Amino acid sequence: YQQTVKTKLYRLSVETFNIVLCYVTLSSGVWTWRTVLWVAIGWIVGISLGMLCCIYVATLHENDLWFSNIKEVEREISFRTECGLYYSYYKQMLRAPSIQQGLSELISDNATESKRTINLLRRMNIYQEVFLGVLYRILPIQAYLEPVYFYIYTVFSLQAVYVIALFITSWLLSGSWLAGALTGVWYILNRVDTTRVEFTVSLRENWSLPFFALQIAAITCYLRPHLKPIQQKVVLWLMFLATLCFCLTWQFNQFILLVQALIIFTLDCLDLISTEQVTCLYLVQVSSLLSVWLLQFCNSMILGSLALSFIVAALFVKHFQRGLKTGGLAARLGKLLLHTVLVLALTFTINYLAKQALQLRSDEHIFKFIKSKFGLGPTRDFDASLYLCEEAFGLLPLDTFDRLAGTLLAYPYLVTLIVLLVMLALVTLANLCDSSAVGRPQKGRGEARPICMRADVAYNLLHTVFFGLLALGTMRMKYLWTGHMCAFAAYGVCGKELWSLCLNMIHCNTKTKLRLIRYTLPLVILCFLYHKFWPKLMTELSELREFYDPDTVELMTWISSKTPKKAVFAGSMQLLAGIKLCTGRVLTNHPHYEDRALRERTRQVYQIYAHQSPEEVHGILRTAGADFVVMEDSICYERRHGRGCRLRDLLDLANGHIMDGPGDNDPDLVHASHPRFCESVKTDGPAYTALFTRVFQNKTFHVYKLRRGKKRAKGDREPVAMEDKTH
């Protein structure tokens, strides 16, 4: 198993090496045989750490599920929630009679949402599944590599790319590959907080974050001083390709690029990078977004994104404010304030007009969530509450910092962050006071100053600050922060600037002492980490478990053998994704929550867990085209969440009903006139048996077939389907 992973990763590593080699070599000066040997050792260490991370997560995945020995249906069930939905399209591409027909079925899909034909390539970010499906069909590997292994090996190999990209970033910042080695070790030891790929294999972030790390490495290289024009063009193309792959593989790309655009805007306002660099970075973002817009069949969600509106506004205002960086300190601060207000005002104006012109409302649930999170919006909104009640969208738990401190990552990170923020404040103040330096990049001004900051360091500093704030506010976003945290902390341990500053303060700054500290300290830390954590890693890798979910296996087997292939199933989003993957049946709703009409349908289908009459539920399900409905005891009698966050509570609040159980209720809530459907339907009362027939049940699931012939309740209508949109 591990040997196969190594073989696949070796081929990927060779290609990656050729692409990213210039990151380290572009700005190098005279090369001696010692330098070549030192760089070669660095590359060997970086690739080895990437392979180690890949093998590590692959082994954990195998040990946790006994993946190589369980049934095919159990393997597919292990792709839980939205992961199963995405993997189903890879499976669909493989089972299609031809590649052309497979693509045609994805472009005109009528099995993902009943009574609707949607373009999946436009709605969802599944180009990676299409690419792997095509690649598997044309490569001569079917005889010795199963499709599922080809898929998961590719995802695990991207983790190697992720580690190598972080390795390069810290190497570029510090000038020593020992920083990269420290970065890779920290990333692996803090796996709980840096990745969750071993149990959410096909999640979109596992595909996109490696490319995002490559893009950060490219930006770091681009902002290094003394790059020649041809070198800048090469790095810009690499940056574009990495950004394109990142945007194409994750629906939340526009929000990440918005944060990155804010970082570039801040660097520009503080006069830390040149106007040419600002323009090039913005254009790379815009060209990547527009390329994805074309590849996703002119997806209007991209044109209506805040990221695109902000970049257009920033470039427009910057073009007409040529005297922004002139005058004294007070004048420049006033101009910067006015400039920021103008850019933000124009951003929201452009975004509002774009959404009105495109009739775009599919991303409103994101803004509802943000408003509710900060107490600025309604607290009973079903979509917003669905997010807010999940732990992943809450604040970052404090025990995260305990784990990071246990591996010695938190301490150098915080020290580096504080020192560099102070340096940034001093450099910014000097820049704002120096009106004669307008138009000159930071590298030209810092040479004559006692304290200076390179543009690449400034970018990475603001990057960790902005994404750190995002992670603190929303726990799921920590994976954007913690990986870069490893590279940033390693730079603090091995970087020249910080140690030179410290040695200057005690008046003993010499090249020998500086080199001794920069090389000795990371080696000491690496030895300590090896001594403390190597036995724990070996123990973790020796723990063997097995996949065990007999109730779900029984359900999927029954559906596959006892129901028509065109049967339509209703139920929870998470379960239906598994039904789509394991059985190929048609769904009423699914976990990809980025379409307004689908969100409304999901809320309607979820009335099976609310206080509703059998006639009302039957009408809703028949309107959605359902033939069968699957109800789960784990939702009907949910205990995972507290009162107010259980799904039945969210439905009661949205319907204006009093919640179950002891506790306070808002005064405007009323008692429901009907019992809870998921409980009452099990009584087999006449009102229920007239409309629903129980056809399957076990300890977890209850499947009911909807009887036909009942007239639709008056007023039950399908919500008007909005235009297909995605993030």
Image (tube, grey):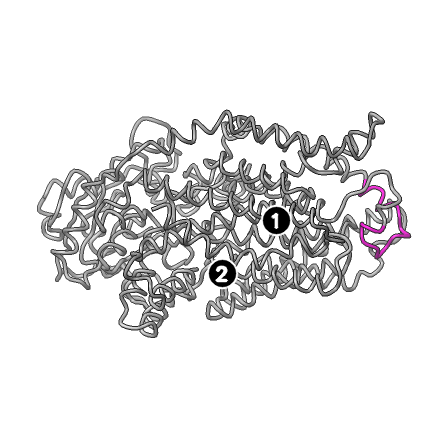
Q: Which residue is mark 2?
A: 248
Q: Nearer the viewer, residue 30 or 343?
A: 30
Residues at marks 2 and 1, CA–CA distance in whole angstroms: 33 Å
Q: Answer yes or no: do the residues labelled 2 and 1 have beta carbons within 8 Å?
A: no
- Disc 1 is placed on an element classified as helix
Where residue 581 appears, as percent x and y from the top left, is 27, 55
Q: Nearer the viewer, residue 673 or 605?
A: 605
- Disc 2 is placed on an element classified as helix
User: Looking at the picture, which amino acid does disc 1 mark?
Assistant: Ala
Question: Would you identify the image quadrant in which residue 350 lies?
Answer: bottom right
User: Looking at the picture, which amino acid does disc 2 mark?
Assistant: Leu
Residue 569 vs residue 52: left or right? Answer: left
Q: Which residue is mark 1?
A: 40
Foreground tag (2 vs 1):
1
Which segment did they paint magenta? 427-444
Q: Which SS type dominates the magenta stretch?
A: helix
Label 1 CA crowd tier, 10 Å (few <14, some 14–19, many 20+): few
Label 2 CA crowd tier, 10 Å (few <14, some 14–19, many 20+): many
Residue at point 32%, 52% (across, down): 84
Above or below: residue 333 compared with residue 362: above
**Residue 7, magenta (yes or no):** no
Q: Nearer the viewer, residue 517 or 124?
A: 517
Where residue 339 appears, as percent x and y from the top left, is 76, 54
**Residue 428, magenta (yes or no):** yes
Where residue 168 appears, as percent x and y from the top left, is 61, 48
